[in-house]
Amino acid sequence: MAAGASTGDFGISKFMSQVENLGGIAKKNRFTVQVTKPQSMVSEIQASKIDFLAKAVSFPARTLGTTTYRSGGRFALNVPYETTYEAMSLTLVNTNDHAPRIFWTDWLEHIQSMDSYNMQYYKKFIGSIKISHYAENQLFAEESFSSYQITLHDAWPKGIGAIEYSWEGTEFSGFDVDILYSRWTKND
């Protein structure tokens, strides 16, 4: 029998009651993204002016790197030796003045100018990104009302995706930004 399962009849009302005791089912469209750029980065676009244009974001993954431990050649046991963090993807809606694209291009330019081969020092090009999720009954998307929030520390854009235009398309313009970071933490 599964953990937490009872021997009684299973019905939708029992299931919904148990889900409600856990706060309800989380909806994918109840999130905000708050970007903090590096202090030394100069951009005509303020991150707070484009944060709301985040169309999609993924909470980052966390994986343990493992190695095989062998004892006497008789058995093998996988054991963890490090935590690895994968790049996180942020999808943004673009505007007619291309403000989101300009902001992220400025950040990449801050890391390395296209006019030189000089790379900025790591501590000078890192920022942070907060991702907050809100319960369906939450009316205000304010940080203090979030049901779950994480911060990506030492975050920086690894790259920005192309924007595809065509005569056939009428959908919104957008692009992806791949974000790397040193670690993430859950905020209380």
Image (cartoon, grey):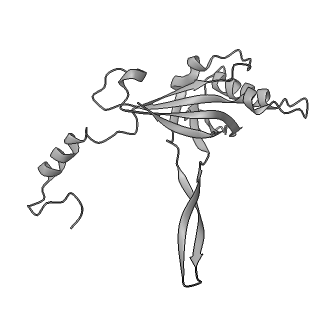
The one of 153 and 89 positioned closer to us in this rendering: 153
Residue drawn at the location 11% of the way across and 64% of the way down: 7
Residue drawn at the location 67% of the way across and 34% of the way down: 156
For the N terminus, the image quarter is bottom left
Q: Is residue 25 visible?
A: yes
State which quadrant residue 6 falls in.
Answer: bottom left
Residue 22 at x, y percent in the picture: 25, 41
Whether residue 113 sits left or right of residue 167 in the image: it is right
Whether residue 26 sits left or right of residue 54 in the image: it is left
Whether residue 64 sits left or right of residue 25 in the image: it is right
State which quadrant residue 91 falls in.
Answer: top right
Residue drawn at the location 54% of the way across and 39% of the way down: 184
Q: Is residue 141 visible?
A: no
Pick out the residue farthest to the top.
44
Q: How many marks?
A: 0
For the C terminus, the image quarter is top left
With respect to residue 143, does 161 lie above or below? Answer: below
Residue 59 at x, y percent in the picture: 49, 41
Pick out the residue farthest to the right.
116
The one of 127 and 140 positioned closer to us in this rendering: 127
Pick out the residue farthest to the bottom.
74
Whether residue 184 sits left or right of residue 4 in the image: it is right
The one of 25 and 175 positioned closer to us in this rendering: 25
The one of 132 and 122 positioned closer to us in this rendering: 122
Residue 46 at x, y percent in the picture: 63, 16
State which quadrant residue 177 falls in.
Answer: top right
Residue 66 at x, y percent in the picture: 58, 63
Pick out the residue farthest to the front.
72
